[in-house]
Image (cartoon, grey):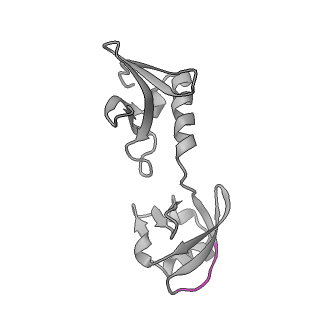
Amino acid sequence: MSNINFQLHCDNFGRLVLTDAQGVRHEGVTPVRAFPIAAPDEGLSLINFEGHEVGWVDRVADLPPALREIVEADLRSREFVPEVERIVGVSGFACPSTWQVQTNRGQAELVLKGEEDIRRLSQTRLLIADANGIQFLVRDLTTLDKHSRKLLDRFL
């Protein structure tokens, strides 16, 4: 378990406040994942309003339950990376192309400007940037259905 040497709570305005081991109070703290895609539950930096790190958590699971709930709620309010569960169809195999996808957040449409906008994060994980700057995650290629993998293979 991590050695957490600070206190964290929400103030009356809903902002995170960290009090460090020396008793210094830091208002408006923002939790930032060190590895949001590859290891979202490991490495959490707590940044003050000036952009300086004022706290560190090795693993989110190491936080006490009440504190973990506060931090995860703050992260959810700022993070938006839909996960592709299925590729329904593509407008064509030349870029730019429009993709119809089913994500963990519902149906979506993305425009792929070029094959270089599909970034391989690991052997089975991809990050797809659409023309509007939204990042779509394919967490595990092997879990996609055969039709989705076949469409995706045309762009890899």
Q: Quadrant of residue 90?
A: bottom right
Point out residue 98 in the picture as x, y percentages from the top left corner.
59, 77
User: Which residue lies most toward the top here?
Assistant: 23
Q: Is residue 87 above or below residue 143?
A: below
Q: Residue at x 45, y 29 (%)?
A: 28
- How many numbered circles does the render carry? 0
Residue sitting nearer the eye, 3 or 20: 20
User: Which residue lies most toward the right here?
Assistant: 106
The quadrant of the image that shows the N terminus is top left
Point out residue 154 in the picture as x, y percentages from the top left corner.
50, 82
Q: Quadrant of residue 70?
A: top right
Q: Residue at x 44, y 52 (%)?
A: 37
What segment is highlighted magenta in the picture?
A: 88-93
Point out residue 137 in the picture as x, y percentages from the top left corner.
51, 60
Residue sitting nearer the eye, 151 or 18: 18
The quadrant of the image that shows the C terminus is bottom left
Is 108 left, or right, of 129 in this rendering? right
Tell whether position 107 is magenta: no
Is 30 left, or right, of 80 in this rendering? left
Is 23 left, or right, of 136 in this rendering? left
Tell whether position 89 is magenta: yes
Q: Residue at x 43, y 30 (%)?
A: 29
Q: Residue at x 39, y 47 (%)?
A: 35
Q: Is residue 26 above or below residue 149?
A: above
